[in-house]
Image: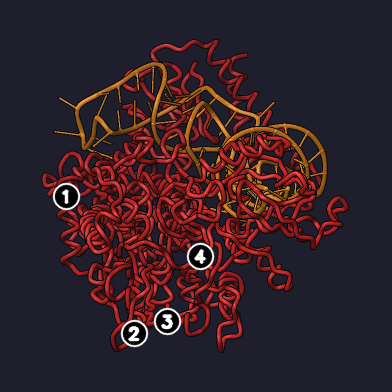
Chain colours: A red, B orange
RNA sequence: GCGCGCAUAGCUCAGUUGGUUAGAGCGUCACAUUGACAUUGUGAAGGUCCGUGGUUCGAGUCCACGUGCGCGCACCA
């Protein structure tokens, strides 16, 4: 069997076959798992559906590694583990991508040239192709998702859920149509939500001027062209400069536009900014629109006048600049102001402007009638608002039920979430895009029906589509069959865990909580793991435009999937960004190969793998126990490791779990125990016992190589193996110090030889005097230091200076030794020990320390001191020999 | 302006509720090597844990202030 295992692990040759075998095993579907019954505890993760906008990137590799590690771990624990896969139609992102492609292909205005149906068809083709690619790639990443439950945010079932949810919210009065200032992307020809805006910094000019010579108040603006739409000037109510004008209206002729400006008072005005007076443009500023509404409520209304159209051009009401682009209009207005002598000053300022995260253009504020979701209105029969539900979900649990509480890792994001919840404004739901769920509203004359298309002729459906996050918000339950009361919903919802990047905390996490708590009165999941983004070696974001993109599939081809998974998970901690670079994946590949070679050696030596229940620990012939010191040590170390890895994954500390596993695998198991096993011989039982279980511990992180090696055991597939949980206490290290002394001795000898630039083969002999713990360890010491002749003796050899380890003295007979340098070595060791002893003594002489520190700590410090004193005594004896 | 995060070896990062002489991987240097593995082994060098002050018997860890970098939110008229 040994010759069946290749010299090096070739991931490329085995991964596809193993994935196929998982698929045909059916184990990705929880109902097919062995020993699963109705009462088996479920563990559910829904996959954040990747956008069908192209191909997967490295961030997806991280996400899949996280959730797949988690679901595989839960499966190994024996739970009914489900990972629901899916993809996202990503309304605006996909349409923007396809339009961009078409324009790159020479089309000027895809929407006009193709029309709705043809463009949607083009997008559908692109989306389907992209979806197929992406699903193939998700599989390449080893993701153990239940493909029988595959969902798509834009399929018929999800459409039913979306429409149902929309209708319920409408009937509850939460969704309404309203005329408000919206965020408008001229380039995208659509609204967007507050969360889809990316603010950028840019330089701009702040112009200070008066509307006309006889207007009493000067105002400042960076957008003079919008001033043709001004209907008021707002000042702070306590501002003495302007108090007298409040309530007065002035008619002015401003660049060919007849303006009627009312002076109003508003607390929102900062008297110290600019002139302390603000030109109010209700139609083109969310703040100003707010003032417009306040004035309306105060029964002291001001007018609203739209001067920028949806096409980004000045409207017919814009006076002399009507029909111009707003850039041209600005120049024209500024020129006019100068000509008229109205311009008082120009200041360069740096300002933040909102841009469309998908189309990139600067967002315009334009008043329109749109569909909105009200977050402040009481939900009929529930006595609370959507905002209340969103708050409760992360604090007390919905309705005070702590089992309905979402916990967020790391915790600091909870605060961020809550800040946002408190500042949330109504959510603009409708988009003037074509790719997406069409608003389920039908009009006929004055009639409006929401939900399903009514019977009869003449009904016209709303042209707009829904914000893409409306469908993703319902993802945890729409994938499980809602609005039908399915068995899946009952078994798997609320889901248990989800991972997502912090950049979609507002866009997605909030919406999922909102939707689920509204529709089901349940949280979407109990635990949220927030991860950072992967950056390149220099800390830059990966992006197509900077040309530093890495295709995860190419990495898999070159290094194997397991190596990729380990490399993105190790060093990645909750909420923090991490870096990805080749050296990291190479190191991970080496680790995978190490695991492979350990296995090859063990299985080869044992003449094949077999399951070992437990290595025999019974005394042979009534004499010594059959397990040696090294055996007990490695079994105890393994037992500790298994326990630790489990609790680390329970805490979502994947990085540390991998580190602990690596440390055990490479250092303890391979470099120490395996080397000792070669010397002591007859170790197959212990080796196989540990190996089989070690593979299981690795499986969540390195599913392919572990499954491949596990084939050699006749234990079935590792994907459904049992996590070794029952080791604790079984293998206790009764005297761990003994093995540590053995290690210390070996390291000291190696070190000594290295210092003396002597090869082990040139050492004549090593004599150990006062062996103590090292009794009987001669062959191990010899084997691991590669020195042939090791013996214990009561008599110390003449004229050699020993190495001192604990109470033992180790005399290494070298071909030639310089006595003077030996003296210096001993003296420097004495100096080190003396310093440290002094520190220990003063610590222990401190009454406060002895009085207040826990006994355990004091005992430890005392032991340290005693050990050192013992060593110092031995060193001093050696030093005396020089005198 | 309000809030958050980060600062530890040359590089990338760990460091559980405060408790050994602060760790890992990579890199560097020296050495080894035909028997599981060069995708290897052995040894070494390398740290004022950003600064200042405080709490404590004890601080990389907790608190305050400061410095630098990054991020979120608001304002941006």
Q: Point out residue A720 in the picture as x, y percentages from the top left corner.
A: 26, 66
Q: Chain of mark 2?
A: A
Q: Point out residue A735 in the picture as x, y percentages from the top left corner.
A: 49, 51
Report the Cα–Cα distance between label 4 and label 1. Answer: 58 Å
Point out the tag, 4 or 3, that comes first from the N-terminus. Answer: 3
On the picture, is A358 further left or further right than A680?
Answer: right
- Residue position for label 2: A484
Point out the tag, 1 or 3, that comes first from the N-terminus. Answer: 1
Mark 3 secondary-structure assignment: helix
Residue A161 in view in this figure? yes
- Residue position for label 4: A368
Q: Chain of mark 3?
A: A
Mark 1 secondary-structure assignment: helix
Mark 2 secondary-structure assignment: loop
On the picture, is A715 further left or further right than A523?
Answer: left
In front of the other: label 4 or label 1? 4
Report the Cα–Cα distance between label 4 and label 2. Answer: 36 Å
Assign the C terminus of chain A to one quadrant of the image.
Answer: top right
In front of the other: label 1 or label 3? 3
Residue shown at 27%/49% (left/top)? A683
Badge 4 and badge 3 both on one subunit: yes
On the picture, is A783 further left or further right than A135?
Answer: right
Report the Cα–Cα distance between label 2 and label 1. Answer: 41 Å
């Amino acid at each position: 069997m040994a010759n069946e295992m290749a010299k090096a692990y070739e991931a490329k040759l085995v991964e596809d076959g193993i994935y196929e075998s998982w698929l045909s095993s059916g184990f990705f579907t929880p109902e097919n798992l062995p020993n699963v019954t109705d009462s088996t505890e479920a563990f559910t993760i829904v996959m954040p559906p990747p956008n069908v906008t192209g191909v997967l990137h490295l961030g997806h590799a991280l996400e899949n590694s996280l959730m797949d590690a988690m679901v595989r771990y839960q499966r190994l624990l024996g739970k009914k583990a489900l990972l629901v896969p899916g993809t996202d139609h990503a309304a605006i992102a996909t349409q923007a991508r396809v339009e961009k492609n078409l324009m790159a292909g020479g089309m000027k205005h895809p929407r006009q040239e193709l029309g709705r149906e043809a463009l949607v068809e083009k997008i559908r083709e692109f989306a389907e192709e992209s979806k197929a690619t992406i699903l193939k790639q998700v599989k390449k990443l080893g993701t153990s998702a239940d493909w029988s439950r595959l969902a798509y945010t834009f399929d018929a079932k999800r459409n039913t859920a979306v429409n149902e949810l929309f209708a319920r919210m409408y009937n509850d009065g939460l969704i309404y149509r309203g005329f408000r200032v919206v965020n408008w992307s001229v380039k995208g020809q659509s609204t967007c939500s507050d969360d889809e805006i990316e603010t950028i910094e840019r330089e701009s000019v702040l112009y200070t001027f008066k509307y006309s010579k006889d207007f009493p108040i000067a105002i400042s603006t960076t957008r003079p062209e919008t001033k043709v739409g001004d209907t008021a000037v707002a000042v702070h109510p306590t501002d003495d400069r302007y108090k007298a004008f409040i309530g007065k209206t002035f008619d002015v002729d401003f660049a060919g536009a007849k303006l009627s400006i009312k002076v109003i008072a508003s607390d929102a005005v900062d008297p110290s900014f600019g002139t302390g007076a603000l030109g109010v443009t209700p139609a083109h500023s969310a703040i100003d629109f707010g003032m417009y509404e306040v004035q309306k409520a105060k029964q002291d209304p001001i007018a609203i006048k739209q001067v920028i159209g949806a096409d980004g051009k000045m409207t017919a009401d814009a006076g002399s600049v009507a029909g111009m682009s707003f850039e041209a209009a600005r120049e024209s207005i500024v020129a006019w102001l100068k000509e008229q002598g109205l311009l008082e000053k120009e200041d360069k300022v740096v300002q933040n402007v909102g841009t469309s995260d998908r189309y990139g253009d600067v967002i315009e504020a334009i008043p329109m009638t749109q569909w909105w979701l009200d977050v402040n209105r009481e939900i009929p029969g529930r006595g609370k608002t959507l905002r209340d539900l969103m708050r409760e979900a992360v604090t007390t649990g919905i309705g005070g039920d702590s089992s309905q509480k979402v916990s967020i890792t790391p915790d600091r994001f909870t605060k961020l979430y809550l800040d946002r919840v408190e500042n949330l404004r109504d959510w603009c739901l409708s988009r003037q895009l074509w790719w997406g769920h069409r608003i389920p509203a039908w009009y006929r004359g004055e009639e409006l029906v929401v939900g399903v298309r009514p019977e009869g002729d003449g009904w016209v459906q709303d042209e707009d589509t829904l914000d893409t996050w409306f469908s993703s918000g319902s993802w945890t339950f729409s994938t499980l069959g809602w609005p039908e009361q399915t068995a899946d919903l009952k078994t798997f919802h609320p889901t248990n865990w989800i991972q997502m990047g912090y950049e979609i905390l507002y866009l997605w996490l909030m919406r999922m909580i909102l939707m689920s708590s509204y529709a089901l009165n349940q949280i979407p999941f109990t635990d949220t793991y927030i991860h950072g983004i992967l950056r390149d070696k220099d800390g830059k974001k990966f992006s197509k435009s900077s040309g530093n993109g890495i295709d995860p599939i190419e990495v898999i081809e070159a290094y194997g999937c397991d190596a990729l998974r380990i490399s993105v998970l190790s060093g990645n901690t909750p909420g923090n960004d991490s870096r990805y670079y080749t050296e990291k994946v190479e190191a991970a590949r080496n680790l995978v190969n190490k695991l492979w070679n350990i296995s090859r050696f063990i299985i080869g030596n044992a003449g094949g793998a077999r399951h070992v229940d437990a290595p025999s620990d019974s005394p042979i012939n009534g004499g010594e126990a059959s397990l040696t010191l090294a055996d007990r040590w490695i079994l105890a170390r393994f037992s500790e490791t298994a326990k630790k890895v489990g609790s680390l994954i329970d805490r979502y500390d994947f990085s540390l779990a991998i580190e602990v596993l690596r440390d055990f695998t490479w250092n303890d198991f391979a470099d120490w125990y395996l080397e000792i096993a070669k010397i002591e011989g007859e170790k197959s039982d212990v080796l196989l016992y540990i190996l089989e279980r070690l593979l299981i511990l690795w499986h969540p992180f390195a599913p392919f190589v572990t499954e491949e090696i596990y084939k050699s055991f006749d234990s079935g597939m590792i994907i459904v193996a049992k996590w070794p949980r029952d080791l604790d206490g079984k293998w206790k290290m009764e005297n761990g110090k003994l093995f540590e002394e053995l290690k210390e001795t070996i390291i000291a000898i190696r070190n000594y030889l290295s210092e003396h630039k002597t090869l082990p083969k040139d050492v004549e002999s090593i004599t150990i005097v006062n062996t103590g713990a090292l009794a009987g360890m001669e062959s191990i010491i010899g084997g691991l230091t590669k020195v042939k002749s090791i013996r214990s003796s009561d008599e110390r050899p003449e004229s050699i200076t020993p190495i001192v380890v604990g109470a033992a003295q180790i005399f290494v007979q070298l071909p030639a030794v310089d006595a003077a340098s030996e003296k210096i070595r001993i003296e420097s060791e004495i100096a080190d020990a003396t310093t440290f002893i002094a520190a220990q003594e003063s610590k222990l002489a401190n009454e406060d320390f002895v009085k207040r520190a826990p006994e355990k700590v004091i005992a430890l410090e005392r032991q340290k001191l005693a050990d050192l004193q013992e060593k110092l005594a031995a060193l001093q004896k050696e030093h005396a020999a020089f005198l």
